[in-house]
Amino acid sequence: MNPLCTLALAAARATLVAACLSGSAQAAPRIALTMDDGPHLRATPRLSPLARNEALLAALRKHQVQATLFVTCGNGADRPDGLALVKAWSDAGHLLGNHTMTHPDLNSPQVSLEQYQDEIERCQQILAGQPGLQRWFRFTFLREGKPEARRDGMRAWMKARGWRNAYVSLDTSDWRLDAYLEERLARDPAADVGDIRRAYLDHLWQRAQAYQQLAMRLQGREIPQVLLMHHNLLNALFLDDAIAMFKARGWGFVSAAEAYEDPVYQLQPISPVAGQSLLLSMARSLGLGRFEGWSRLVDDGDFEIEQLEKGPAPAPR
Ligand SMILES: [Zn+2]
């Protein structure tokens, strides 16, 4: 049992005891699935845009997972055929969030705060009327703006207009493995991609465990993790396997709405360069520096790509 719970039981403080008992009864890790940058209308070496969208929705339907799609409207939702793909998510009971029109970088001096905010408002107008639409904003590149005056300007603007910062806690480099997958399939659309599937699942599991440990270190408890994935070919092919893996290993899926009820998602880290995973940003704000396991959380999937390049290990003789 958590040492704090042991203390509470010893002190017989009824409310704490109740919290400890209910906490121990729901020990399974919880995870909310969020997907950025979609829907994309661009061509990929396998599957049409519609087929990719349907594959993602089919995996979610099969596992009865309610996900959140953070729409980058300029990737397709600003055209009727792309908006139809968004509508399919909303009609299936998923939630929708906002991820700008063209995915600008708020840390770039070439992008003004006003321009960035205008992109959010224009995308929200395109999505208006979809039943699943929330007033949730996911920062592009998970960058919240620098210098600090810009970060604070954005925070004040969001607060005044009722926007939630739709934080990620469990950041992944699925985008990197997706690029690797597309490169291989561009050379040969029929190529075997079983090794990329395995590398992706290993990557997800490594990151999940690392962020679970970081939450314990920072909060002294499990938090409902908010997982970042992208609307891409990699997930169209392997999302079913990814969800199945988490479930088989005892993780329970919740909606992002439920995850965001946790008070940790109200925090605003004071790191001069806020962004990336909320947990990493908190660690930096607390001056934890390069804690054990840090490098694998910020390597953009380099480890997995190197392993893939090496090919399978030789069979033991
Ligand atoms: Zn993005």
Image (cartoon, rainbow, N blue to C red):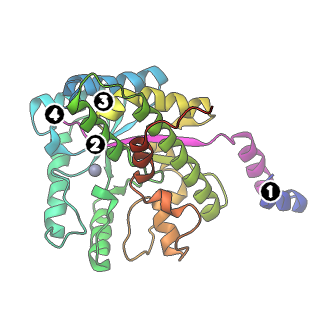
Comparing labels 2 and 4, the label whose residue is closer to the camera:
2
- Up-down: is 269 above or below 253? below
On screen, residue 62 versus residue 91, left or right, reads right
Q: Name which residue lies at 59% across and 37% down.
A: 251
Name which residue type carries label 4: Leu
CA separation in Å, label 4 and label 1: 51 Å
What numbered label is drawn on residue 41? 4
- Up-down: is 180 above or below 283? above
**What residue did someone put label 2 on?**
179
Figure quadrant of residue 119? bottom left
- Up-down: is 154 above or below 74? below
**What residue did someone put label 3 on?**
89
Comparing labels 4 and 1, the label whose residue is closer to the camera:
4
Q: Name which residue lies at 44% across and 75% down.
A: 270
Of callouts 4 and 3, the N-terminal one: 4
Q: Secondary structure at mark 1?
A: helix
CA separation in Å, label 2 and label 3: 24 Å
CA separation in Å, label 4 and label 3: 15 Å
Name which residue type carries label 2: Ala
Of callouts 4 and 1, the N-terminal one: 1
**What residue did someone put label 1 on?**
5
Which region is colored magenta?
14-42
Mark 1, residues whose alpha carbon is within 10 Å: few (<14), some, or many (≥20)? some
